[in-house]
Image (cartoon, rainbow, N blue to C red):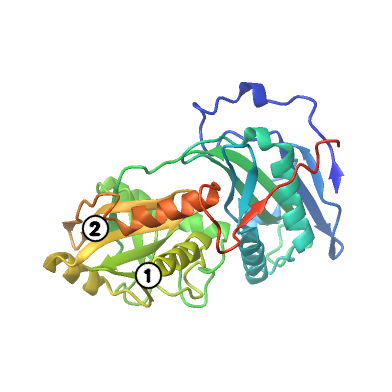
Amino acid sequence: MIIQKTENSRISTFDPNNFSFGSTFIDHMIICEYENGKWGDVKLVPYGPIPFTPAMMGVNYGQACFEGMKAYKDKDGQVFLFRPEKNFERINKSAKRLAMPEVTEEMFLDGLKALVDIDREWIPQGEGMSLYIRPLIFATEEALKARVANKYMFAIVATPAKSYYAEPVSVKISDHYSRAANGGVGSAKAAGNYAASFYPTQLAIEEGYEQIIWTDDATHEYFEESGTMNVFVRINDTIYTPPTSEKILDGVTRDSFIQLAKKRGIEVKVEPIAVKTVVEAQKNGTLKEVWGVGTAVVTTVFQALGYNGEKLELPKLSDEESYAAILKKDLVDLQNNLSEDPFGWRVVVDHALETV
């Protein structure tokens, strides 16, 4: 790895009590270029612009995918990653689906640890605080030709993160737009998936909702995801979540919630969730909770579902009654080294670059 430390650290300007998630970036980034059929050297360099032209193929033809993950700092200042091997596996799954070169485990994990290590001062401590990390791969070849590109860049950037969507939100069950289709790229974290979601979400916001529950493209009769999150439904004391497929993203937080629920003895059914079933459960009082999970938000609880022009209110549960709240606490405590880790999910980031 080639390491170039910044001579102008911005850490003194960072106020952990007053910053903007997603637009406050740490001092460094990882970059690695692909050309002539192979990846070059991984470079840790000062964060900043990279020169590209509007003819870059990633912009024109959409060969771009990314991951979302976090680093955490405990009360003693020790830094942890959470299940990074899952993100490594998934970014390569996305790259393969988009006909891009896969990255090596050394590139991904060593680059990740080096970046988090050198900028560990940027990781805020405290409840809901973390460093959000964005690994990505995109086509960089300068050519207006609709084909697989010959040049790519792997990069990792990061931004301090804090809790958001803290309040329950209202979501609209989509009856027209879909996030993904059979045979498509729904199971990949393709950049274009997010672009395609913005317009339907904007329409939902104009109707008074904060987000959308995506339904299947063929019939709109089954839940798939919610916004940029996986979705969970609790009917009575059973949790339901749709199975992953070529249309549904294999979320790391989703998998973690499932395993934590099972550890608590909560029944989890991974099976298709019919919109009709959820609406009927709301009507007869057996629908207890609906929530979304994802890396950035961890958990977003829904207070109402919009369906067929009607706003279906959900019960207001205490943190002690809510499976969403209980499992969120289990997960966050584990991520922040406040509880035992029986799964081996925490990965310590050592001070490897202190003398570099």
Q: Residue at x 57, y 37 (%)?
A: 75
Q: Can you give x and y, in whole percent of width and height, for residue 271 in the image? A: 37, 78
Q: Can you give x and y, in whole percent of width and height, for residue 144 in the image? A: 71, 57
**Residue 28 visible from this viewpoint:** yes
> The disc labelled 1 sits on which kind of residue?
Gly
Residue 302, disc:
none
Q: Earlier along the polypeptide chain: callout 1 or callout 2?
A: 1
Q: Can you give x and y, in whole percent of width and height, for residue 104 in the image? A: 77, 63
Q: Can you give x and y, in whole percent of width and height, for residue 166 in the image? A: 36, 42
Residue 305, disc:
2
Q: In the figure, residue 310 lies in which quadrant?
A: bottom left
Q: In the figure, residue 191 lies in which quadrant?
A: bottom right
Give the structural element (helix, strand or loop) at label 2: strand
Q: Residue at x 79, y 62 (%)?
A: 150
Q: Residue at x 36, y 55 (%)?
A: 326
Look at mark 1 in the image and give the residue it sits on. 265
Answer with left or right where residue 323 lies relative to residue 54: left
Q: Residue at x 47, y 72 (%)?
A: 247
Q: Residue furthest front?
A: 340
> The disc labelled 2 sits on which kind of residue?
Leu
Q: Nearer the viewer, mark 1 or mark 2?
A: 1
Q: Is residue 271 above or below residue 25?
A: below
